[in-house]
Image (tube, rainbow, N blue to C red):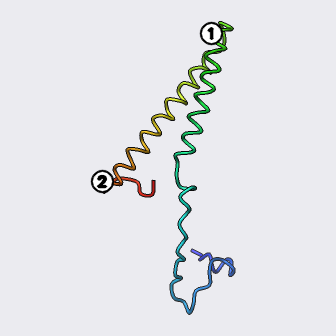
């Protein structure tokens, strides 16, 4: 097989004297970019507002597409489940559980 460097000499970082390339340490992201709470809260609130609007229009107008109503309800419920999963993972990380996600 042909190595990538043989096909394209500009491929990849330069290696000093044929030695291995040291990987650069990436800086950690700010807490505001890593925290999933605002995203889940805004999404759940939006689904709840949509559900309420559809519920009111369904009651006032009568017959209509109920699939939207159930979709909005499912989005709101799944957002609540998402909050529970985040809390569960955080408590597991605080306990020191091996299977817990770090950084939440």
3D distance between C-alphas at marks 2 and 1: 47 Å
Write down the quadrant of residue 56 in the picture. Answer: top right
Q: Where, by quadrant of the figure, is residue 26 drawn?
A: bottom right
Residue 91 location, x and y as percent? 35, 49
The quadrant the N terminus occupies is: bottom right
Image point (56%, 21%), residue name: 70
Query: Residue 23, position in %: x, y?
Result: 52, 77
Say whether disc 2 or disc 1 marks the residue closer to the N-terminus.
1
Residue 12 higher or lower than 43, as above or below: below
Task: Give the total number of marks visible in the rendering.
Answer: 2
Q: Dot 2, how many residues are within 10 Å of its Cα: few (below 14), some (14-19), or many (20+)?
A: few
| In-front residue for pair 30/6 | 30
Circle 2: element type = helix
Identity of the residue furthest to the bottom in this view: 17
At label 1, counting other C-alpha atoms closer than 10 Å, the crowd grade (few under 14, some 14-19, many 20 or more) is few
**Residue position for label 2:** 95
Where is 38 relative to 64, above or below? below
x then y, percent, for residue 28: 53, 66
Q: Which residue is mark 1?
A: 59
Residue at left offset 45%, top offset 53%:
104
- In the image shown, does 64 or 37 lie closer to the viewer? 37
Q: Residue at x 52, y 45 (%)?
A: 37
Q: Position of residue 62 (x, y in %)?
A: 65, 6
Residue 63 in the image: above or below residue 75? above
Q: Residue at x 54, y 89 (%)?
A: 18
Left or right relative to 85: residue 99: left
């Amino acid at each position: 097989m042909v190595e990538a460097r043989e096909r394209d000499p500009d491929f990849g970082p330069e290696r000093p004297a044929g030695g291995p390339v040291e990987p650069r340490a990436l800086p950690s992201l700010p807490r505001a970019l890593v925290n999933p709470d605002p995203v889940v809260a805004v999404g759940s609130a939006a689904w709840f507002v949509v559900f309420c609007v559809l519920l009111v229009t369904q009651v006032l107008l009568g017959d209509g597409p109920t699939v939207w109503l159930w979709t909005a309800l499912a989005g709101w419920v799944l957002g609540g489940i998402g909050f529970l999963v985040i809390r569960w993972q955080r408590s597991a990380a605080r306990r020191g559980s091996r299977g817990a996600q770090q950084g939440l």
